[in-house]
Image (tube, helix red, strand yellow):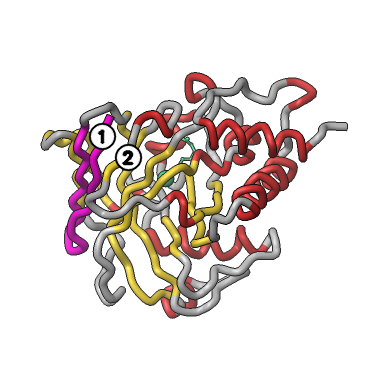
Amino acid sequence: MKNLAEAAVTVDEAARTATAIPQFEGENSFSVDEAYAVQAMSIARRLDRGEKRVGVKMGLTSRAKMIQVGVDEVIWGRLTDDMRVEEGGSISMADYVHPRVEPEVAFLMGAPLSGDVSNLEAMAAVEAVAPALEIIDSRYKDFKFALGDVVADNSSSSGFVVGDWRAPDIDFSNLGIVLSADGRPVQIGSSAAILGNPVRSLVAAARMVARWGETLEPGWIVLAGGATAAHPLAAGMTVRSETQDLGTVGFSVAD
Ligand code: 0L1
Ligand code: MG
């Protein structure tokens, strides 16, 4: 019998100390349900250390991302306040194993949402929308993992930056997005790459968290998923993403 609690300690310590670990292979590999149980236990350790839960991230919501990591299912992870980087702030490479950044759309929940909901019901629960960046950092050596590995590792969640919130009264189904590093465009995409429309990612989030007894709570942030492939970060880099009608969001990598 696999020891899921021990695996939770392993992934949590890898994230806490920014240390690469091997994949869980062979008899140690996880089913998807086991992997979500490991994720829940590893996040419980973070909460025990004083971090606060602030939302959910959706992962692998674009074809580009699925192809980049060789996995073909939408996944989710849990966000804590410790993962948030202020807009315009800076991070240190020492806090990550091999971080990458991807442009996203973020939702701010105004009402609880959970279970099977329609696009309209999902949007009725949204208070605001913003451009966002997710800093992903698989704790697995060489960013190589199977589906169970990445889910156990909180779906590679490690940091996020949110730009200015605005009322969700625009059509954000197909907004152009340019991700730049040091002023040079490195990825160009559209919010349509997020499951065809980011609201579908919110619908999937409501359904997927319900399976684990959770609700998207008022005040929570839901990161809808990457609109492009992720770009590797390096010391000294300045990152900025510009999203049509939503504006810009960015940060820098200090060292
Ligand atoms: O947010 C994402 O789409 C990332 C999910 C995990 C895969 C990866 O680490 O690239
Ligand atoms: Mg992402």
Does dot 1 land on a helix, a strand or a loop?
A: loop
Answer with the quarter of the image where residue 149 lies.
top right
* Amino acid at the residue labelled 2: Ile
Answer whether residue 28 is visible to the viewer in this image: yes
Task: Compare residues 148 and 92 and report the one nearer the observer.
Answer: 92
Question: How far apart in space, not on screen, are marks 2 and 1 (Cα)?
Answer: 6 Å
Spot occupied by residue 17 in the image (x, y as percentages of width and height) = 53, 31
Image region (quadrant) for ligand 2: top left
Residue linked to disc 2: 91
Answer whether residue 192 is visible to the viewer in this image: no
How packed is label 2: few (under 14 Cα within 10 Å), some, or many (20 or more)? Answer: some
How packed is label 1: few (under 14 Cα within 10 Å), some, or many (20 or more)? Answer: some
Answer left or right for 76 relative to 1: left
Q: Residue at x 36, y 60 (%)?
A: 106
- The quadrant in which the N terminus is found is top right
* 242 magenta-colored: yes
How many marks can you see?
2
Spot occupied by residue 29 in the image (x, y as percentages of width and height) = 72, 28
Q: State if disc 1 and disc 2 touch (CB < 8 Å).
A: yes
Answer with the quarter of the image where residue 137 lies.
top left
Q: Residue at x 24, y 45 (%)?
A: 251
- The quadrant in which the C terminus is found is top left
Spot occupied by residue 90 in the image (x, y as percentages of width and height) = 27, 43
Answer with the quarter of the image where residue 216 lies.
bottom right
Q: Which residues are magenta?
A: 237-255
Residue linked to disc 1: 254
Task: Compare residues 197 and 110 and report the one nearer the observer.
Answer: 110
* Amino acid at the residue labelled 1: Ala
Q: Earlier in the sequence, mark 2 or mark 1?
A: 2
Relative to 23, residue 92 above or below: below
